[in-house]
Amino acid sequence: MIAVAAVLASCNNYETYGDKKEKERNAISQYISSHNITVISEDQFKAQGMKTDVSKNEFVKFDKNGVYMQIVRPGVGSELKDKEKANIVCRFSEFDIIADSITFRNNTPTFASWPDVMYVSRSSSVYTASFLGGVMYSVYSASVPAGWLVPLTYIKIGRPQSMTEECAKVRLIVPHTQGHANASSNVKPYYYEITYEKEA
């Protein structure tokens, strides 16, 4: 009887992939609600000139990949052109939505000398990338989360040339399917704040 009870208890504690996806969806919904995020459609995003209103805390949700994006600053310079390759310097903070805690970051003075650099190549509308070094490279791998590449279609990648110019900055909610290997294997969503600028 005891053995049967133990087996039944373990079965009840087992989470299927479907259970984990539902938990992820609920966590994202709760995060959006608790942070007063206004979700807009891709059609509205396009009608606004590919912009999100930060004063309204707008995030556009991309139906194809489930990523939510807010463009805080569009950046300077120009977007990557077709067939162009570039090294892009990224500073970020990563927040585990389910655990409700910051996991890693390099956007503080302490880590000022340790940015992530990713080598990015564009072919038509497809971006591929790999990390060359930095926190993400050291913690996870050279593989760049697909979610990190979503903003590249909508921001400019350059380097500020004056005190009045600033590099591109976005905020993202990245579901596990668009995240790094750890996110994928654990079915975890992450929230990011990331800046992008071309390496000197």
Image: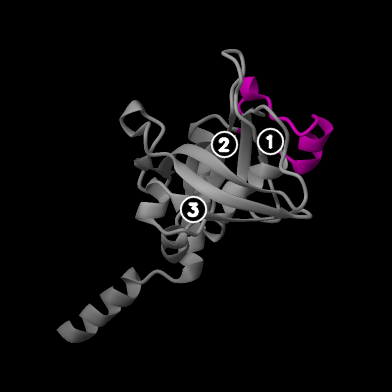
Indicate the amino acid at tag 3: Phe
Where in the figure is residue 159, as x and y percent of width and height?
A: 60, 29
- Choose the circle earlier in sequence order: 2 or 1: 1
| Residue identifier under label 3 | 131
Where in the figure is residue 75, as x and y percent of width and height?
A: 65, 28
Front residue of 29 and 44:
44
| Residue identifier under label 2 | 196
- Choose the circle earlier in sequence order: 3 or 2: 3
Where in the figure is residue 96, as x and y percent of width and height?
A: 40, 46
Q: Residue furthest front?
A: 200
Residue at coordinates 80% horizontally, 29% vertically from top-left? 48
Residue at coordinates 67% horizontally, 43% vertically from top-left? 152
Q: Are marks 2 and 1 in contact (CB under 8 Å)?
A: yes
Indicate the amino acid at tag 1: Ile
Residue 1, can we see it?
no
> Helix, strand or loop at disc 2?
strand
192 magenta-colored: no
> Helix, strand or loop at disc 1?
loop
Where in the figure is residue 97, as x and y percent of width and height?
A: 43, 45
Q: Residues within 10 Å of mark 1 (few under 14, many from 20)?
A: many
Q: Tell me where the magenta segment starts and ends, as one range.
A: 38-57
Q: CA distance from mark 3 to mark 1?
A: 19 Å
Quarter placement of the N terminus? bottom left
Quadrant position of residue 198: top right
48 magenta-colored: yes
| Residue identifier under label 1 | 155
Quadrant position of residue 129: bottom right
